């Protein structure tokens, strides 16, 4: 009963939040911020503890597993594009991943972030199912990582178009790769506003960044921290 | 009807998740089971062992609703609220600065490589 109620409630609030953000696209109304906020209010009003809620909705979280597997489909569909631009995609996403990890590491040192916060924030630039795996691998806390990934997506969606404008980036490939590398799924969402090509490269950047960060998480990060 | 197809296809995608988990037992690499599953599904598609239609609707649904699946984890933040409010603003600035650097570098490198390779592309 609790399970059905929590899953249904989460789904409905998520839909509602998406609608609200669609109507008023103001960063603070982003459904990834709005939905959790509304749910936190809802469960505290109904006297459900966070842990009870998390336990009841574990089936939703479980879907991240098959969702990760499902990424095989866009890669397969875009195979000709991947083959044609493989070099550019790899060079750009390796650079982006290194910048993401090192700048996050350096900045978290500057603000004296606690150790488990730092290990949780390092994989923030990649899509959640992968970020959680990297986080677990290097000793981070999956919940915190999820929140940092969401913040990255929301902030990236806001600053992305400005970065593209400031640097007067012209090619669809560079725009798409930057958005997908910097802000994973939220960036890809933004890339759709530029066009189909930008969105394709953005989703490819998101997938390649996930692979690369996963490798770096296993090899580079443990040596660094 | 359509929902039934999506559910069946998601169950079929689970087969690859389980195969991935089995492969992870054999290959001792710090790579998640779902990633092995992704490779196996990709391979099966490339080798035409399975058809795209068998999984496409389920996969598209999973990817379209990806954001929904991490809403519960985000709610879990209430367990850390006192620490977040303490350094929250600094963390937001950190993410903003770092994201601008990541996007800027990625865009510049990609633009340079694309333009050097020749202007006929795109």
Image (tube, coloured by chain):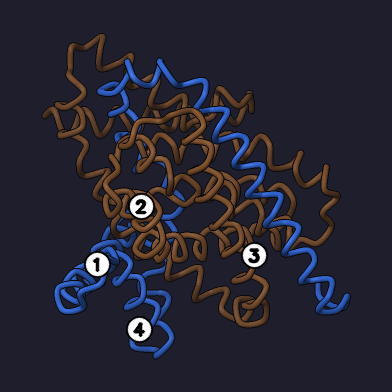
Chain colours: A brown, B blue
Disc 4 marks which residue?
Answer: B44
Have a look at marks 4 and 1 and say if they share a chain.
yes
- B11 sits left or right of A110 in the view: left
Question: Most extreme residue toward the right, as rendered?
Answer: B119
Q: CA distance from mark 1 to mark 2?
A: 13 Å
Let me know if marks 4 and 3 both belong to one chain.
no
Query: Foreground: B10 or B90?
Result: B90
Q: Secondary structure at mark 4?
A: helix
- Using the numbered discs, state the Cα–Cα distance from disc 4 to disc 2 in whole angstroms: 22 Å
Residue A51 image point, x, y percent? 16, 27
Sequence-first disc among 3 and 2: 3
Q: Residue at x 59, y 41 (%)?
A: B98
**Residue at 36% from the left image edge and 58% from the top image edge:** A223
- Residue at 40% from the left image edge and 48% from the top image edge: A128
CA distance for labels 4 and 1: 13 Å
Q: Tag on residue A92?
A: 3
Mark 4 vs mark 3, CA separation in Å: 28 Å
Residue A65, percent across and down? 28, 57
Q: Helix, strand or loop at disc 2?
A: helix
Q: In the picture, residue B118 is in which quadrant?
A: bottom right
B75 w.r.t. A157: above or below: above
> In the rendering, at what x and y percent does residue A41 appear?
33, 14
Q: Which residue is mark 2?
A: A129
Residue behind mark 1: B17
């Amino acid at each position: 009963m609790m399970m059905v109620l929590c899953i249904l409630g989460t789904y409905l609030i998520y839909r509602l939040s998406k609608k609200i953000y669609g109507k008023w696209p103001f960063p603070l109304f982003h459904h990834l911020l709005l939905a959790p906020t509304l749910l936190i209010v809802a469960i505290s009003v109904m006297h459900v503890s966070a842990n009870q809620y998390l336990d009841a909705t574990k089936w939703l979280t479980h879907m991240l597993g098959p969702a990760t597997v499902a990424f095989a489909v866009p890669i397969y569909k875009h195979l000709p594009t991947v083959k044609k631009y493989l070099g550019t995609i790899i060079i750009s996403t390796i650079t982006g991943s290194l910048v993401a990890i090192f700048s996050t590491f350096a900045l978290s040192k500057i603000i004296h972030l606690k150790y488990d916060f730092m290990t949780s924030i390092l994989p923030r630039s990649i899509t959640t199912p992968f970020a959680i795996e990297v986080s677990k691998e290097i000793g981070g806390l999956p919940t915190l990582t999820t929140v940092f990934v969401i913040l990255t997506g929301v902030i990236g969606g806001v600053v992305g178009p400005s970065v593209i404008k400031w640097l007067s980036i012209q090619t669809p490939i560079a725009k798409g790769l930057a958005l997908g590398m910097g802000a994973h799924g939220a960036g890809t969402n933004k890339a759709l506003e530029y066009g189909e090509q930008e969105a394709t490269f953005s989703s490819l950047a998101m997938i390649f960044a996930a692979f690369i960060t996963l490798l770096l998480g296993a090899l580079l990060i443990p040596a660094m921290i | 009807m359509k929902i039934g197809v999506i559910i069946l296809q998601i169950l079929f995608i689970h087969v690859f998740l389980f195969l991935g988990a089995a492969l992870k037992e054999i290959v001792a690499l710090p790579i998640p089971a779902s990633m092995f599953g992704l490779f196996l599904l990709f391979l099966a598609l490339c080798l035409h062992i399975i058809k795209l239609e068998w999984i496409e609707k389920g996969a598209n649904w999973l990817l379209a609703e990806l954001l929904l699946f991490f809403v519960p984890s985000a709610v879990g933040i209430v367990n850390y609220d006192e620490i977040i409010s303490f350094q929250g603003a600094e963390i937001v600035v950190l993410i903003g600065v770092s994201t601008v650097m990541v996007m800027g570098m990625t865009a510049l490198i990609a633009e340079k490589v694309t333009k050097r390779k020749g202007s006929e592309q795109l």
